[in-house]
Image: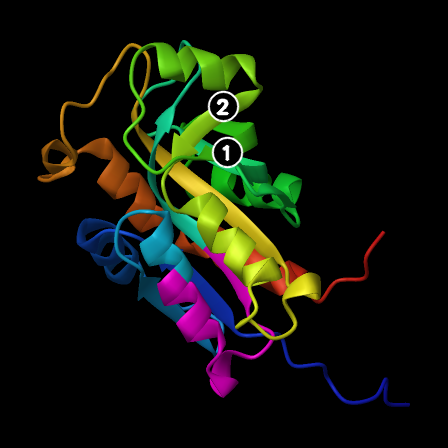
Amino acid sequence: MSDGPAVAPPPLLIACALRIERTALRSGRDRGAPERYEVLRTGMGPRAAERAVGRKLAEPALHGAAVLATGFCAGLLPGMSPGDLIVAEETRDPRGTVACAGSALLAEALARAVPGRTVHLGALTGSDHVVRGQERGRLRAEGAIGVDMESAATLWTATRGGSAPGGADRPVAAVRVIVDAPEHELVRIGTVRGGISAFRVLRAVLPAFYDWHRSLLLPRR
């Protein structure tokens, strides 16, 4: 007896800001990729992310797409190291908070994809500038464990943007690789070029993203 027609998974949109991030993601593609997915380079900063993601999600081919924001970030907790990963349970910016789907499952999948790397679960906050010094301490005191300039804007646009049909029910997630931490301050983004561990980690995480995407079809508990 048939269980009925198979339900097609939604498309997957993976959004990153920088050329080096997109290069890492494209060089790490795996056979487990979903049939319909795309890596979008948004450009740097929240406004660029909003524009690029809003335009992309308005395309009919990506109607209902799951959205995963990724790339590099600054870690806020003492003891964090370059190459550690942050899985957002929520993203925050001045407009509010967006809850992420399947964060625990995604963290487990990342631990399998990059064994030996520490995976941190918590709140990822957004900024419109590079955060340094005392501002890091303030964000940490507010409960954030990491900060970047695009994840919060990407997920806000995906779930609440006027040009993103179906946004309210859209599954979203954010995964960031730490390149900058309290004991490992990054002077400029150009120093991540040339084989730094964060690039290799980002190249290795795609199988975990695919596992998260496949999990969206599982019954909710």
Question: At x 44% / y 46%, what residue is drawn?
Answer: 151
- The image position of residue 207, as x and y in percent, is 45, 55
Tell me the residue at 26%/49% (across/down). 44
Please check the rendered image and state whether residue 59 is part of the magenta-colored stretch, yes or no.
yes
**9 left or right of 158?**
right
Name the residue: 54% across, 61% down.
158
Q: Which residue is mark 2?
A: 145
The residue carrying mark 1 is 124
- The x and y percentages for residue 97 are 62, 41
Q: Residue 30, can we see it?
A: no
Q: Which badge, 1 or 2, comes first in the chain's sequence?
A: 1
Q: Position of residue 118 (x, y in %)?
A: 45, 25
Q: Amino acid at mark 1?
A: Leu
Relative height, residue 9 to residue 176 (above, below): below
Q: Are marks 1 and 2 in contact (CB under 8 Å)?
A: yes
Residue positioned 37% across, 56% down in the render: 49
Q: In the image shown, does 93 or 37 lie closer to the viewer?
A: 93
Is 149 situated left or right of 92 in this image? left
